[in-house]
Amino acid sequence: RFLPAAELLRNMTNAPALFAVALPSEVGYAGGHRWTRVHYVSHFSNILGCAPVASDFLFDGEITSDALARFRYVFFPMLNVVTPEHDAAIRAAAAKGVKIAVDTYCSVDYPGAVRLPTKFRAMKGDAAQVPPELRRDFLAWFETLCPELRAAAFAVSDRDGEEAMTFVKEHGGAKYVIVVNFRRREGGSIMNEFCTEPWYRPLGAPQRIVTELRAAPGTAVYDFTDGGRRLDLPRKNGAFVLSHDYAAAEAKVLAVYPRPLVRMNAKAVGTLAPGGKACLGVAIRDDAGHLAPGRQIVELKLKGPDGVLRDESGRYTAEGGKVIIPLRFAADEQTGTWTAELRELTTGLTTSVAVSVGAKK
C-alpha cells in the first residue's frame, strides 16, 4: 500500500503556505547567538509543527519582494541587522499588503509591522533555547491568525494540530490531499515497557476526522487508499466534507481532479513479434475528452497466450494523462493473443487490450 502512494506523491510540490518564518543570512552573524539559524529553524519548527495550518521557512534566495508577496504573514525573528536588499524586499512586500512581524531585537521600524514583546535569548549558559515567554507570546499572536489561515486553506481537518495532520500537494493542475491520524493513547502498548516517562503516549487510537476540501462544484474527489473509489461528498459552506472513522495510525490519500476522469484507452504499436520492440500507449481522459491533469499510477498485468504474467507487468507513472510502457519480446516468445489488463490507481479506471503477437517475418 505504501509504495504506490510513494510513487504517486514523490517530488510533488506542497501547496503554498500563507505563513512563513524568514531567516536571512544576516541573522546568522548578528542574531545574538552561535549557529543562530540552526537554532531558530529547530525551535520554530517545534512550535509550528503543532499548529493547525501549514507554514514555511524562507532563506536568502527566497527573500525577495515577489517571493514574500505569496504570503499573508511573514515573521522575521532577531532581525538586528538587515541588508539593503532584504530591507527593500520587506518594504515592497509590506506595500503589497503582506503583514510583517518582528520581535524586540529588530532594529528597524517597518510600517504596519507587528512587534512581539519578546526576543530569542540565551538560557542555561551559552545554550540558545526558546524562553517560555517567546513561545507564549509568539503562540498568542499566531493563534489569532489561525482562523483566517485555515479559512483560506484548500483542505483542513477538525483535528489538525492536535491529533491529525492534513497536507496538500499540487501537481500539473490536480491536487492530492493526505490526512493522517496520529491520535495517541494512554498506555496499553509494549512501548510503555521501554519508555516509562509519564509524558509518553504511544500512537494507536482510532478516531473520527472531518476534513473540508474547498474545491469548486463538479470537482471529482477519489480515495486513492480505497481502490480509487470516487467519493460522493456533501457540500457545506462552499466545501466538500469528508467524515471518516480512521483506524489507529491510518492515513488517507485523496486525488482531487477538476473534472471526473471517465476513460482509459490503450494501444500497442511497434514490432509485435518475437524479438521485436513495441510499446503500449495509455491515455486517461476526463468527461470532456481532455487528457487527465496531474499524475496517475497505471498498474499493468501483461499475460502471454499461456496466461503467465510477463516481466513488463508492474506500476507505471502517467503524467498529464499519458504514459508509454515499453514492451520487449524474447526471440523465442510465444505468438498468439496477449492480454494487457490495466488499472489506474487514483480513480479505479480499468481497461483490457488484446495484443496480437505474430510470427517473425
Image (spheres, rainbow, N blue to C red):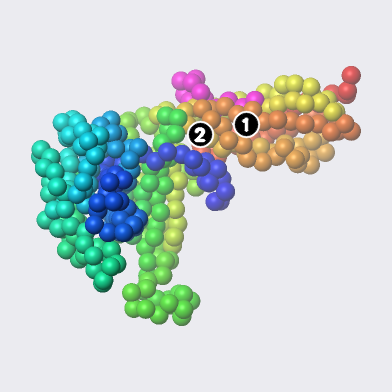
Q: Is residue 59 above or below residue 267?
A: below
User: Which residue is at a point 31% across and 45% down the rendered structure image?
Assistant: 25
* Image quadrant where one finds the C terminus: top right
Q: Which residue lies under the disc numbered 2?
A: 295
Image coords of residue 315 (percent x, y)? 63, 40
Instruction: Give coordinates of residue 215: x percent, y percent.
Output: 33, 34
* Callout 2 crowding tier (Cα within 10 Å): few <14, some 14–19, many ≥20: many
**Would you say residue 202 is visible in this rendering?**
yes
Rate crowding at label 1 as few (under 14), some (14 to 19) or many (20 or more) other CA atoms within 10 Å: some
Residue extent of the magenta highlight: 281-291
Q: Which residue is mark 1?
A: 351
Q: Secondary structure at mark 2?
A: strand
Q: For residue 283: magenta?
A: yes
Q: Helix, strand or loop at disc 1?
A: strand
Q: Which amino acid is tagged 2?
A: Arg
Find the distance from the CA under tag 2 to the CA under tag 1: 18 Å
Of badges 2 and 1, the one in the foreground is: 2
